[in-house]
Image (cartoon, helix red, strand yellow):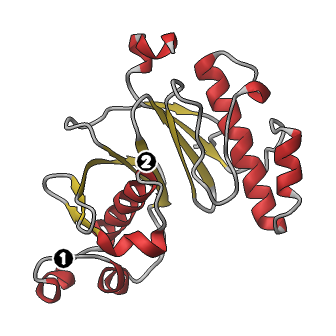
């Protein structure tokens, strides 16, 4: 696709939206799909697809409804070959979308999220000398790790339940390694107002995405 050879298409684009119940840019097929879901999942499905279409329409200068988006419930969204790669994440109050010409994964979490970080580390994560290391971890360290690992799982189009225990996280080198399948990725952490964002990618150099903020109130 000719567009992807231009400079502005070489760096990742990130769109941020606060959740507001927007469902005004969806297809008839997406509406039919939403009716098969629970009320909560239906609302999230329609809002995230609306934001996906709205975001990609600004990138490709196309009518949002005509974006050739494949985004079924519970599956990673995708575009046809030649149109790049997208990843989607949402938390209780925000939706995050990233587009890149290369494969990429993204995750977002509230920075003030309340959770038992020691139990999360013990249950899910791989460490060398785990028992002696784990008590040194702070909540921020575990939140960063969770975001990075989940971004890696999205890069791989995997499942948290199956894959989270196989990803090893290296804070200093900013690397992620899937120990069972020998996948090596790099990651970046972005602290954005009340949210923590992670990107996972194959590029050796740290990515500096263009942040496109929409529908924000801060």
Which residue is under mark 1? Answer: 127
Asked if 212 appears above or below 18 in the picture, the reply is: above
Asked if 58 appears above or below 71 in the picture, the reply is: above
Q: Position of residue 70 (x, y in %)?
A: 67, 41
Mark 1 or mark 2: which comes first in sequence?
Answer: 2
The answer for how far apart the CA atoms under marks 1 and 2 are is: 22 Å
Query: Marks 2 and 1: in contact by CB < 8 Å?
Result: no
The residue located at (74%, 54%) in the rendering is: 45
Q: Which mark is residue 1?
A: none
How dense is the environment of label 1, judged by Cα within 10 Å: few (below 14), some, or many (20 and up)?
some
Which residue is under mark 2? Answer: 105
Q: Quadrant of the C terminus?
A: top right
Q: Is residue 47 left or right of residue 118?
A: right
Q: Position of residue 42 (x, y in %)?
A: 80, 59
Q: Is residue 71 left or right of residue 89?
A: right
Mark 2: secondary structure: strand
The residue located at (31%, 80%) in the rendering is: 121
Q: Position of residue 80 (x, y in %)?
A: 59, 31
């Amino acid at each position: 696709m000719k567009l992807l050879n231009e400079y502005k298409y070489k760096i990742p684009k990130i769109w941020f939206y606060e959740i507001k119940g927007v469902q005004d840019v969806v297809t008839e097929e997406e509406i039919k799909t939403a009716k098969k879901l629970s009320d909560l999942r239906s609302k999230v499905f329609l809002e995230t697809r609306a934001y996906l279409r709205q975001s990609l329409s600004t990138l490709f200068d196309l009518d949002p409804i005509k974006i050739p988006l494949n985004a079924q419930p519970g599956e990673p969204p995708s575009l046809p070959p030649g149109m790049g790669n997208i990843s989607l994440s949402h938390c209780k109050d925000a939706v995050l979308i990233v587009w890149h010409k290369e494969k990429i994964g993204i995750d977002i979490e509230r920075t003030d999220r309340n959770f038992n970080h020691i139990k999360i580390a013990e249950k899910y994560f791989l460490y060398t000398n785990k028992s002696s290391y784990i008590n040194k971890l702070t909540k921020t360290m575990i939140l960063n790790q969770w975001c990075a690992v989940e971004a890696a799982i999205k890069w791989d189009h995997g499942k948290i339940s199956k894959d989270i225990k196989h990803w090893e996280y290296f804070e200093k080198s900013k690397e992620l390694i899937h120990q069972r399948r020998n996948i090596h990725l790099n990651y970046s952490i972005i602290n954005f107002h009340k949210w923590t964002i992670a990107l996972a990618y194959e590029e050796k150099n740290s990515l500096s995405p263009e942040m496109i903020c929409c529908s924000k109130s801060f």
